[in-house]
Amino acid sequence: MKNIIFEYHDIAKSERLEAFAKEKLENLFKRYDFVIRADVFFKSENTSSDETGKKCGIRLSAPGPRLFAESSHENFNDAISETVNELLRQLEKRNDKMKTF
């Protein structure tokens, strides 16, 4: 199991959110074993839109510059999913670069 650290800003700690995030990150860790750690940030913001406000940011520790993505949705599950998908795109690029050396 890789190291996953959770931080909460303006919301209560949630076992359910952590379990969902871990499940999504496990797929990423299995695919890219060079990722050694994930810092996951949950934040609730007041926004004028009903479709945003639940923000998830994830920073990954891997060789090279740190990878970071975040998104804001009406619920945290959607924000986690979109953030992990964006990190997968970044990891694809990083992996391709690593193969060329």
Image (spheres, grey):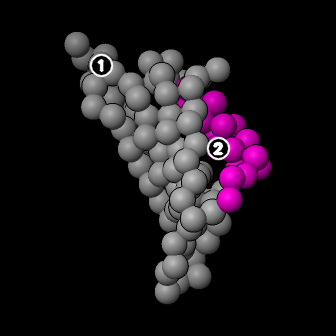
Residue 26 against residue 75 in the figure, above or below:
above
Residue hosting label 1 = 98
Specify the principal SS of the magenta part.
helix
Tag 2: amino acid: Ala
Q: Is residue 24 above or below residue 75?
A: above
Mark 1 touches mark 2? (CB < 8 Å): no
* Marker count (numbered): 2
Q: Residue at x 46, y 24 (%)?
A: 35
Furthest residue in direction right, as rendered: 16
Specify start and end residues of the magenta stretch as a single range.
12-29
Please name the residue that numbered disc 2 is placed on: 21
Asked whether, in this view, residue 18 is left or right of residue 86, the answer is right
Residue type beneath disc 1: Met
Q: Which of pointers 1 and 2 indicates the residue nearer the eye? A: 2
Q: Which residue is painted at 64% across and 20% down in the image?
A: 1
- In front of the other: 65 or 3: 3
Is 46 colored magenta in this rendering?
Answer: no
In the displayed orientation, state which residue is furthest to the bottom.
48
Alpha-carbon neighbours of circle 1 within 10 Å: few (<14), some, or many (≥20)? few
Q: Circle 2 sits in a helix, a strand or a loop, which is it? A: helix
